[in-house]
Amino acid sequence: MSRSAEDSSALRIDQDEAPAGYFAVLKSEAKPLDGGNICRACDWRQECDGLSHRCMPYAVFSCRDGGELKRNDGCSVVFKRKRANTNSATNPV
């Protein structure tokens, strides 16, 4: 079955693929209002090396060990920092 970024109802984000202390949000729901680079909407950006905690839905091969890297859920996401005061409506666990 083909997944489209526009059809977010068909996507199920695997929160286990997010870095510790962060949760994943679909890029289609987090895009900057000014139309700028989507990476600016990601709180994980400063630690991003493009290899661990993939945000892209397609597979790449690691330059470190040649292993395949991909999101198992097939979603295109950004990572948002979890808040200390969690609210399940805005801060999923």
Image (cartoon, rainbow, N blue to C red):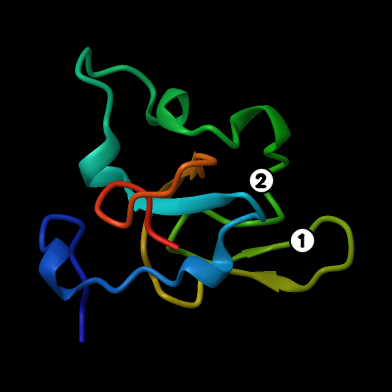
Location of residue 86 with respect to 46 vertically, above or below? below
Percent x, y of residue 29: 22, 43
Percent x, y of residue 39: 46, 30
Q: Which residue is mark 1?
A: 62
Quadrant in the rendering for residue 28: top left
Provide the secondary structure element on which disc 1 rests: loop
The numbered mark at residue 14 is none
Type of residue at label 2?
Answer: Gly
Provide the secondary structure element on which disc 2 rests: loop
Percent x, y of residue 53: 63, 57
* Label 1 neighbour load within 10 Å: few <14, some 14-19, many 20+: few
Q: Is residue 25 left or right of residue 65?
A: left
Q: Is residue 25 left or right of residue 44?
A: left
**Which residue is depicted at the point 21% across and 78% down?**
2
The numbered mark at residue 50 is 2
Q: Residue furthest top?
A: 34
Percent x, y of residue 70: 57, 68
Nearer-N-terminus badge (1/2): 2
Q: Quadrant of the C terminus?
A: bottom left
Quadrant in the rendering for residue 30: top left
**Which residue is depicted at the point 48% across and 33% down?**
42
Quadrant in the rendering for residue 16: bottom right
* Label 2 neighbour load within 10 Å: few <14, some 14-19, many 20+: few
